[in-house]
Image: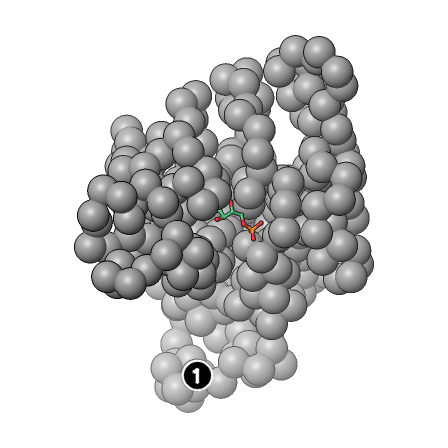
Amino acid sequence: MKDEMKKLADLFYTRIIGPGSGVNIHWLRKVMRALGVKDENIDQLYIINAPLSREVWYYAFLKLHDSKKLAEFLNILVEKFGAVNLGNLQSALPSLSLEYRDGRFSTRVFKIAVLVSGRGTNLQALIDAVESGKLNARIVVVISNRKNAMALERAKKHGIETRYIPAKKGEKREDYDRRLHEALKDYEPDLIVLAGFLRILTPWFVSQWRIINIHPSLLPAFGGIYGMAVHQAVLEYGCKVSGCTVHFVDEKVDHGPIIVQRCVPVHDDDTPESLAARVLEEEHRALVEAVRLISENKVMVEGRVTKIRRVTD
Ligand code: GRF
C-alpha cells in the first residue's frame, strides 16, 4: 500500500473508528456502494458481521484508490465527523493527487507550463493528450520568447493562456530569467516543459523549478545543437539509429537525468528532413509519456539515473 495512503487511512482510523462512532462494516458497505464500489470481500464481511478492523479499513482505501472516489469518500467522513487536522500529512496529499482546503478534499490537477519558441508540435501533443484524458493535467500557460511562434496560436485555439516575453536588447540572461520566473509564479506550475524553447536557462532559474526538456537525439550523443543540425550530424556520423530524449534540466545543456528515450532507424536514403520527421513522431509520444509519469509521481531520481516507481513500491 502506498505509504501516504496508509498514513491517511491510519489518521482517519485512529480519529474516528470506535464505539459510538457509527462507523462499522454496515456503514462502510453502504458508503462504498453509494460511491459505486461493489466488493465481494466487503459483502462477505458484512454477512458475517465482522468488526471493522484496521486491515479492513486499509482494504477499503485501496479499493478507493482512484483519487476522485477517494476524495468523495474522505468528504463523507469529514461531513460526518467534522474537519480534520491533517498536520504534516497535508504535504503528502499531492502524491495521492489530492488537495484539502477549507474542510473539503478535491482531486488535484497537475499543472504544466510550457515554454516555446516555434511551431509547437510537441505542445500540440500535450494539448491533445490532456483533451483526450490520456494526461490528467492542465496546461496553465504557454510562454514564448518569440512573437510569431505558431505554438502561441495553437495554445489560443485551445483556450490556453499565453504570454509573450521577449528578451530586451542587451538584457542579461539572469534578468530575463527573473522576469520569466515572476510570470510563471502567477500560475504555480508543478512542472515546466521546454518544448522547443530556444534559450539557455541560468543555473539560478533551473534551481527554482522542476523542468524537463525534449531533445531530438539519443543523448548524450548530439547534444548542444538544435533543429536540422542535429539530424544532419547524425547522418554525417553514419549512425544506424537515432531518436529523442526527454530529460530533467540541470545546469548543463542537454545533460540532466534521462526520463524517456525512444529510437528510430536511420535509413540509407534519409535526408535530415526525413529523419527529423521520423524522430518527431516519437518525440510526441516520449514527451506525453514523460509528463504522465511525472504527474503520477512515478519518476524517482537517483543521482543522474531515473527509475520508474512500480505500484507496489
Ligand atoms: C523539437 O524537435 C524538440 O526536440 C526540440 O525543438 C523542436 C521543437 O519542435 N527541442 P516543435 O516546436 O515542438 O514542433
Q: What is the three-letter code of the residue carrying label 1?
A: Asp
Q: Which residue is drawn at 23% across and 42% down?
A: 237
Q: Residue at x 39, y 86 (%)?
A: 40
Which residue corresponds to mark 1?
39
In terms of image quadrants, where is residue 274? bottom left
Q: What element carries label 1?
A: loop
Q: How is the image coloured?
A: one colour
- Left or right: where does residue 188 sit relative to residue 279? right
Number of numbered discs visible in the structure rendering = 1
Q: Residue at x 62, y 14 (%)?
A: 174
- Left or right: where does residue 176 sit relative to residue 297? right
Q: Is mark 1 within 8 Å of ligand 1?
A: no
In the rendered image, is residue 73 in sight?
no
In terms of image quadrants, where is residue 221? top left
- Is residue 183 or residue 224 the one in the foreground? 224
- Left or right: where does residue 76 sit relative to residue 241? right
In the rendered image, is residue 112 in sight?
yes
Q: Where is residue 302 in the image (x, y as percent from the top left)?
A: 28, 33
Q: Where is residue 16 in the image (x, y as percent from the top left)?
A: 56, 55
Q: Where is residue 281 in the image (x, y as percent from the top left)?
A: 44, 63
- Left or right: where does residue 10 sit relative to residue 21? left
